[in-house]
Every structure is written in C-alpha cells, then in structure tokens.
C-alpha cells in the first residue's frame, strides 16, 4: 500500500505515483530537519516502492552508490554498490547525475528531473522521472540522498 499523498507543492510536480509515495514517506519522517536519518529509511517503509529506489551517500565532494533497488540495477545494467560516482564520470549520463546530485545537496531540499529522455547508453529509448531527497544525520547537513525513479518507453507517458 502506498503512503497517502501530501498536498505539498513539490509532490504535485511529480507525475509518478511511485515518486510521490517516496516523497510522502520522506516528508513524514523529516520532522522539520533537512531530512530524516538514513536509519529511518527501512525496507519495511519502502516496501511498495523499493525496486525503484536508491541511496547515494555524500562522501566529501563525491557520491557513493550505497543501495539500489532491482529496477534501478536493471536500468543501470549492473550493481554499483560501493562505487564512487567520480569513477564513472565522462559520459553524458553520469555527468548529468553528478550535476543533479550536487544541486540537490546545495539546495538541501527535494530535487527532481523529468520526465526527460534517458541519456544512458543503450537506454535512450526510455523517458524517466527522478527525485532525490536529502537525508541528514545531524538535521542540518546532507549526508546522503534517497532517490527514486521511474521509466517508460519514450512517447508513452502522460503527465499526471
């Protein structure tokens, strides 16, 4: 069962119900902080949307893939757990991911992209929508990003 939707203006910009569900969970857990603590994001809470979720840890001036659900791994072509994003830079896709994550950390707020055509090699036939949401161990600084995405064949998605 998906969490009830918030009337938050950010959530209304998301076309994917899965992304809205992840945002709603995040919003309910953050309790006035920049974001909830990582340990509050549990498999039980993500049960219905876990395949579409991922967590990127902030490591100094870089990002480390920490967790990726089955749909994320399928889209990426292989698991990247433990991999630093900087080691993948040099492609349009990963360079775009890097800019996207940096913007979210700087904003200390939810960040979204799409629906937009994928730039990942071999996945250009797909469109995607992505959201990242800050996680914070101290309530003030972004220590990780909880993300979710959904894809569909290009030209087949109707905005919500």
Image (cartoon, rainbow, N blue to C red):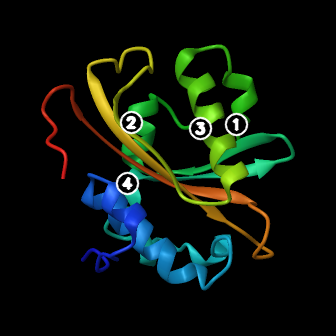
Q: Which sits earlier in the primary sequence, circle 4 or circle 3?
A: 4
Q: Nearer the viewer, mark 3 or mark 2?
A: 3
Specify whether 69 is left or right of 20: right
Distance of label 1 from label 4 (alpha carbons): 19 Å
**Which residue shows up at 54% across the image and 37% down it?**
79
**Residue at label 4?**
51
**Residue at label 3?**
100
Q: Residues within 10 Å of mark 2 (few under 14, many from 20)?
A: few
Distance of label 4 from label 3 (alpha carbons): 21 Å
In the rendering, which numbered label is found on residue 39?
none
In the rendering, which numbered label is found on residue 83?
1
Say if 130 sits above or below 128 in the image. below
Q: Which sits earlier in the primary sequence, circle 1 or circle 4?
A: 4
- In which quadrant of the rendered image does the N terminus lie? bottom left
- In this view, the residue in front, 103 or 55, is 103
Distance of label 1 from label 3 (alpha carbons): 17 Å
In the rendering, which numbered label is found on residue 74?
2
In the image, residue 102 lies at what x, y percent?
69, 41
Quadrant of the rendered image containing residue 86 = top right
Q: Which sits earlier in the primary sequence, circle 1 or circle 3?
A: 1
Q: Residues within 10 Å of mark 3 (few under 14, many from 20)?
A: some
Q: Nearer the viewer, mark 4 or mark 3?
A: 3
């Amino acid at each position: 069962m998906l969490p009830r939707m918030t009337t938050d203006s950010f959530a209304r910009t998301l076309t994917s119900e899965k992304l809205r569900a992840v945002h709603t969970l995040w919003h309910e857990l953050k309790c006035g902080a920049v974001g909830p603590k990582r340990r509050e994001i549990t498999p039980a809470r993500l049960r219905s949307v876990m395949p579409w979720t991922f967590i990127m840890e902030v490591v100094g001036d870089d990002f480390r893939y920490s967790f990726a659900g089955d749909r994320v791994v399928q889209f990426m072509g292989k698991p990247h757990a433990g991999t630093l994003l900087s080691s993948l830079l040099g492609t349009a896709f990963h360079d775009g991911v890097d800019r996207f994550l940096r913007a979210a950390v700087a904003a200390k707020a939810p960040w979204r992209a799409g629906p937009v055509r994928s730039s990942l090699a071999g996945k250009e036939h797909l469109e995607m929508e992505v959201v990242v949401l800050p996680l914070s161990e101290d309530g003030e600084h972004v220590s990780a990003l909880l993300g979710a995405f959904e894809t569909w064949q290009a030209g087949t998605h109707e905005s919500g």
